Structure formats: C-alpha cells, structure tokens
C-alpha cells in the first residue's frame, strides 16, 4: 500500500488543473485522428506557447475566490458561501474574458443568478448534468479545515447554482472527495473502491441545509429518490472505471472506456482513468487526457487536478508552470491552502 503526503498538494492540483485545461483546449471538438494529425504523437504533445485556459479554469478560480471570501468571514456555511459564489459567477458571466467556449448551462444559470431577489434554486438548471460543475470543484477538496459534511455540502451547492441535476451534484461531491483523498496520500490502487464506498454511503442522503428545496423542481417523489438517481449513475460509471483500469490499453482513446466527458459522471471517470493509467507520470496522464475524442479540456483539467493533488507542485515542468495563464492567481490560492 502506498502512503505519501504530497508537497504542496493544493498548488499542484490547481496548476495541474489549469495545465490540463490549456493542453486540452485546442484539441476540444476534434477526434483522435485529427489530434494526431495536427499535434503529432500523443506522448509528445506540448503545451501551447500561449498557454490559454478555458472557462474550466476561469470558473475554478471563481469558486476558489468565493471559498476564500466565505472562510475569511467564519466557518463555511451555505449562505456564507452562496453569496460570494453567486457574485463571482455573475462577475465571470459579465467578464470580457468569458469568451472561451463557455457552456450553455452556466450562461443560462448565471444570467438568472444576476437577478436580485431570485432564489438560487430558481436559477439552477435542474435538467443539466453537464461537466461544468465538477470540472471546477477541486478547490473544495483542497481547502483545509472542512468537515465531511461541509465538504460534501459545499461541493453540491456550487454545482447546484448552475447544474441542478442529481448526477451533477453527486459527481461534484465525488470529484471533491477524490481530490481530498489523493491530497491526503490515499493509494491510487484502492481509490476506486474508496469512492464506491463513499457513493454507497451517500446514495440517499439529501442535505436540506445546503440544498434547500432544490429537489422540488424535479419530478421525483422525494428528496431521497432525487439524489439517489445521481449516485446510481455515478456508481454505474465507477464500475466501468474499475474494469477500464484493469483492461484498457494506454494507447487507446480513454473515452471509449468511460465516456466522452460531456456529462458529469463521464468527465469524472475519464479524467480519473487517465490519472490511474499513469499515477506517477503526470505529464503523460495529461497528454493522454488531452488526446481524446470527447471534452478534452475538461477531461485533462480533472486529470491534472487528481495528479497534482497526488504528486504535489513539483509534478509539473517548470517551463509549463511558468507560462500558464492566471499563474499568479493559481499560486496564491495554492499557497493559502497549502499553508
């Protein structure tokens, strides 16, 4: 069993997330043959000279800033997080930099969130389980001092402001938990089993403190039925992931095994698969994730968060880390949480 505590896990995860995003962003919407024809062998993919990120990193930083603001004001609680998070998301919505192929769900929800007096539950897109919620959730797995209830509740709340589908909530919770486990030194070999146990434990747990009456916007007969739908989809993809880790060749498109990543549970599983194929080769893991037929930037973004949490800040090439967009913001949040 591998036991390790990575050096500067938060910095490593945030840098890895942004590097994966920037590596995968140009490849998004291309199939694997097109990627290979344009960028050459996948094991040799290089970070673009101008390492620009997508909305994935932009919204991760928005969440990170909201978390920092909320925790400066006291113990993390629903309203204490919801206010700055809503403000950060609306600021992102209005930003001139919001031109990096943002998702329709985030745009629709943020347009509603900017309306004064509107409950966030009425802005939430209850039918959307796009990956836009869990590709940004890593900070909640990195910030120190949270209880299990706070971490789970905050992960689901930040999802619910935009993506209210129960699978988006569960995948966000599961992603944050995976990041936390890796940052604390969990052995990657046993990680899928730990995540499966976590999903089973939470399968019918609807936290009204954090989610309020969100479930009533659905057609489910009870909050437990509502949330169980999401965890069941995550449990199903964990089974596919467990099989893929044992049988998939690293040379094949990972999306063929665990999904293209446009939806929450598949982005989580495929991003984690790429990490688990190369747990001690973080750059190779990022390249495998970026050279995929699905949502390449979001998959690689998640792979980078997992690898960076496990290996720490020194996992990444210095010349890559030096030119990533938003470097100073990423390093500032990482240093805060690593301290």
Image (spheres, rainbow, N blue to C red):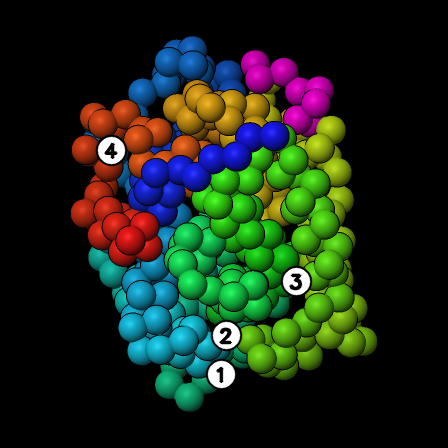
Secondary element type, mark 2: helix
- Between the C-alphas of marks 1 and 3, the distance is 18 Å
Residue bearing the label numbered 2: 123
Disc with the residue nearer the chain's start (1 vs 3): 1
Residue depicted at x 43% and y 73%: 76
x then y, percent, for residue 141: 47, 54
Disc with the residue nearer the chain's start (4 vs 1): 1
Residue bearing the label numbered 1: 119
Residue depicted at x 32% and y 55%: 337
x then y, percent, for residue 167: 65, 57
Q: Quadrant of the N terminus?
A: top right
Q: Residues within 10 Å of mark 3 (few under 14, many from 20)?
A: many
Q: Residues within 10 Å of mark 2 (few under 14, many from 20)?
A: many
Nearer to us of marks 3 and 4 is 4
Quarter of the rendering containing residue 66: bottom left
User: Left or right of 266: which side holds 52?
Assistant: left
Disc with the residue nearer the chain's start (3 vs 4): 3
x then y, percent, for residue 221: 81, 76
Q: Are marks 2 and 1 in contact (CB under 8 Å)?
A: yes
x then y, percent, for residue 217: 66, 76
Q: Which residues are magenta?
A: 244-251
Q: Is residue 227 above or below residue 335?
A: below
Disc with the residue nearer the chain's start (2 vs 4): 2
Residue bearing the label numbered 3: 166
Residue depicted at x 26% and y 50%: 335
Residue bearing the label numbered 4: 321
């Amino acid at each position: 069993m591998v036991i390790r505590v990575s050096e500067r896990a938060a910095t490593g995860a945030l840098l890895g997330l942004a590097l994966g995003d920037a590596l995968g962003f140009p490849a998004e919407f291309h199939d694997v043959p097109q990627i290979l024809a344009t960028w050459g062998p996948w094991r040799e993919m290089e970070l673009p000279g101008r390492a620009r990120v997508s909305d994935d990193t932009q919204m991760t930083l928005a969440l990170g800033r909201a978390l920092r603001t909320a925790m400066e004001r006291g113990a993390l609680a629903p309203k204490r997080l919801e206010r700055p998070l809503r403000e950060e998301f609306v600021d992102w919505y209005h930003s001139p930099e919001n031109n990096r192929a943002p998702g329709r769900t985030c745009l629709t929800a943020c347009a509603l969130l900017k309306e004064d007096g509107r409950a966030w539950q009425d802005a939430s897109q209850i039918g959307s389980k796009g990956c836009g919620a869990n590709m940004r959730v890593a900070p909640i797995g990195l910030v120190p001092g949270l209880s299990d209830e706070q971490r789970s509740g905050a992960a689901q709340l930040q999802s619910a402001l935009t993506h209210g589908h129960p699978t988006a909530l569960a995948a966000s919770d599961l992603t944050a938990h995976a990041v936390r486990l890796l940052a604390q030194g969990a052995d990657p070999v046993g990680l899928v089993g730990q995540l499966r146990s976590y999903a089973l434990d939470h399968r019918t747990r609807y936290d009204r403190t954090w989610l309020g009456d969100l479930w009533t916007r659905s057609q489910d007969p009870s909050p437990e039925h509502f949330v169980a739908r999401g965890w069941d989809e995550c449990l199903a993809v964990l089974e596919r992931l467990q099989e893929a880790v044992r049988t998939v060749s690293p040379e094949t498109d990972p999306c063929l095994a665990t999904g293209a990543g446009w939806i929450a549970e598949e982005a989580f599983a495929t991003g984690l698969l790429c990490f688990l194929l190369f747990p001690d080769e973080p750059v190779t893991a990022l390249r495998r994730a970026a050279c995929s037929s699905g949502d390449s930037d979001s998959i690689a973004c998640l792979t980078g968060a997992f690898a960076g949490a496990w290996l720490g800040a020194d996992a990444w090439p210095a010349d890559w880390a030096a030119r990533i967009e938003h470097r100073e913001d990423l390093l500032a949040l990482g240093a805060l949480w690593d301290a």
